[in-house]
């Protein structure tokens, strides 16, 4: 118990990265949803056209795009919430 005082940690279920935070810790968001699955670089936020948005309830989907590919790589990965224990 003594060695756990102060820090909580949890692993992202998608990328396996370990997140740490001071206790008391609240769940944190892993930013791996902004990383291009093809080249591993950070993607740019991408705003779909309104017709596409209307398909989704509330238009709250998060879109990212990497323009280093032809065609560009579009991602609709959702942020991963990592629980810290
Ligand atoms: Zn992650
Ligand atoms: Zn890429």
Image (cartoon, rainbow, N blue to C red):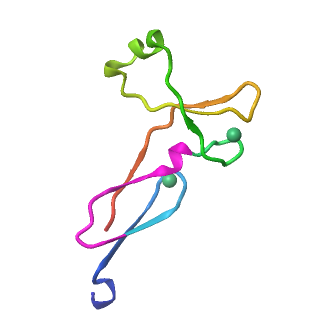
Res. 67 image quadrant: top right
Count of numbered marks:
0
Query: In the figure, 80 relative to 6: above or below?
Result: above
The location of residue 54, given as percent across then percent down, is 39, 12
Q: Position of residue 83 (x, y in %)?
A: 33, 59
Q: Residue furthest bottom?
A: 2
Q: Give the range drawn in magenta.
A: 21-34
Question: Residue at image x 65%, y 47%?
Answer: 41
> Where 33 sits versus 70, above or below?
below
Q: Which residue is drawn at 73% across and 35% down?
A: 68
Q: Where is residue 72 in the image (x, y as percent from the top left)?
A: 69, 28
Q: Residue at x 29, y 80 (%)?
A: 6
Q: Quadrant of residue 61?
A: top left
Q: Is residue 36 left or right of residue 12?
A: right
Which residue is situated farthest in the top direction here?
A: 51
Drawn side of residue 63 relative to residue 21, left or right = right
Q: Which residue is drawn at 53% across and 59% down?
A: 16
- 83, 7: nearer the viewer: 7
Residue 58 point in image, percent of width and height: 31, 21
Residue 37 is left or right of residue 82, and the answer is right
- Left or right: 49, with 65 as reference point: left
Q: Quadrant of the C terminus?
A: bottom left
Q: Quadrant of the N terminus?
A: bottom left
On screen, 82 above or below 10?
above
Q: Does the magenta stretch include residue 27?
A: yes
The residue lying furthest to the right in this view is 70
């Amino acid at each position: 118990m003594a060695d756990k005082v102060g820090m909580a940690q949890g692993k992202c279920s998608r990328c396996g990265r370990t997140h740490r935070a001071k206790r008391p810790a609240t769940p944190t968001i892993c930013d791996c949803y902004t990383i291009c699955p093809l080249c591993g670089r950070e993607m740019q936020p991408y705003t779909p056209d309104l017709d596409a948005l209307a398909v989704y309830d509330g238009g709250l989907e998060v879109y990212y795009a990497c323009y280093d590919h032809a065609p560009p790589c579009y991602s609709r990965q959702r942020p991963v919430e990592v629980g810290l224990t």
